[in-house]
Amino acid sequence: MSKYNFDTIIDRTNTNSSKWDGFEERFPGLNTNGALPMWVADMDFKAPEEVVEAIVKKAEFGIYGYPKSQGIDFCNAVSKWIERRHNWKIDNNWIVSTPGIVSAVTYAVQAFTNEGEGVIIQTPVYYPFKNRCINYNNRKVIENPLIFNGASYNIDFDDLEEKASDHKNKLLILSNPHNPVGRVWSEDELKRLIDICIKHNVIIFSDEIHSDLILKGNKHIPAGKVSDEVLDYLVAGYSASKTFNLAGLKASAIVVPNEKLRKLFKNIIAKNEAGGLNIFAETGFVAAYNYGEVYLEELLEYITGNVDYVREYINKNLKGVKLIEPEGTYLIWIDFRDTGLELDEINRVVVEEAKVAGDLGDWFGIEGKGFIRLNIACPRKIVEEAMNRLKKVFGR
Ligand SMILES: Cc1ncc(COP(=O)(O)O)c(C=O)c1O
């Protein structure tokens, strides 16, 4: 018997939810009235009950004074989780907490590059890397676009070597697993990428926020496990936020094995007075990592069921619409370019006519134009509703 019922529909409207409340401002120029929100990456499921209980207990204590931040419980929970789930043994001293992965990438950009220098990203990719972490800090966006073979995406290693060999490009942001294309990078791919970065002295921020969300038949390899040498070039970002739906708690655990890099990274955090987690974040993360394994196993089964449902539905009912088979994450990348619509029309038709508000493909880079990313971490009934809406417009 399952412990969790992910079929339960919870009304999130009027709860100050970014995903559900007043999201029209995130879709400028499009009418989102009545559209089903399938965009930003949080889940429409409750967190594990142990997390809720721990936070309630903390809340009921009633004194919310300064915590002893990043205590031993937090570090142990993180390091044990990474070892248990991903077979990578890390030292507690390597962990630096930040209020999220985007802030950690920002600190890495500030710590390891100077204004005007280049930061490599692999487009189409999670857009805050470019829009926020790099652009806000006056660094140069260097794109190493993935190669799409019509079914899945691969790294363009020749292009990466060329970009990495320019000594002005100091940092690579790796999305592992990759959002939005759903690749779980193999050990061989990671090794090739890491070898290139080490050869050209490029530091790697390996964003592993989705690393617990791996679909059957695939295995997440932490970048830090690939070789001993990579430990001197690596900043690896972990978080319980996607795995257990805790994004609003605002926390992440950044693993920086090299002492010199860690010092630079921590200096930036200190300079910005941005260290320390709030008490509810720390409480929630510790409970999730210590007691959340049953939840995660059941969640993965449910997400797999949603992916299976979408695959079958699209193949049977939709014309010119193609699911890019995901290996990980609960975000699915769908190609609408063969629907007969003009490329420029696809976003409008999906949002305004089908009334499905997924992340628009071109937000992730020009390569994403004509694609839509749907978040399927929601009850099956909502996924069915989204598919039925798409059928009304793209049905066979
Ligand atoms: C690849 C990736 N990195 C980072 C984040 C956001 O992380 P945080 O909320 O911890 O800043 C997301 C959220 O969707 C993501 O997909």
Image: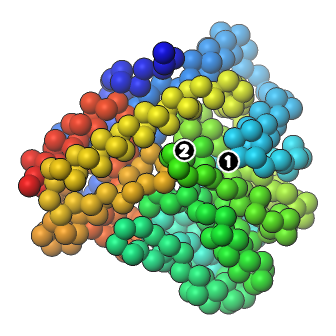
Q: How many marks?
A: 2
Q: Amino acid at mark 1?
A: Tyr
Name the residue nearer the viewer: 29 or 376.
376
Indicate left or right for 36 with 374 as reference.
left
Cβ atoms at labels 1 and 2 below 8 Å apart: no
Q: Which residue is found at the position 58% from the left and 62% from the top?
A: 185
Name the residue nearer the viewer: 70 or 157.
157
Distance between the Cα atoms at labels 1 and 2? 12 Å
Residue 350 coordinates in the image, percent (x, y): 19, 55
Residue beneath disc 1:
238
Name the residue nearer the viewer: 152 or 75.
152
Q: Which residue is found at the position 67% from the left and 64% from the top?
A: 187
Quick check: can you spot residue 99? no
Residue 251 coordinates in the image, percent (x, y): 65, 40
Quick check: can you spot residue 324? yes
Q: Which label's residue is closer to the chain start, 1 or 2?
A: 2
Q: Is residue 353 above or below residue 235?
A: above
Under tag 2, what secondary structure?
Answer: loop
Residue 79 coordinates in the image, percent (x, y): 80, 40
Q: Which of the numbered marks, if any, corresponds to residue 213?
A: 2
Indicate left or right for 47 with 260 as reference.
left
Indicate left or right for 263 with 83 as reference.
right
Tell which tag, 1 or 2, sits nearer the viewer. 2
Badge 1: residue crowd in 10 Å (few <14, some 14–19, many ≥20)? many
Badge 2: residue crowd in 10 Å (few <14, some 14–19, many ≥20)? many
Q: Amino acid at mark 2?
A: Leu
Residue 257, image quadrant: bottom right
Under tag 1, what secondary structure?
Answer: strand
Residue 393 coordinates in the image, percent (x, y): 10, 53
Quadrant showing the C terminus = bottom left
Q: Which residue is found at the position 56% from the left and 32% from the top?
A: 296
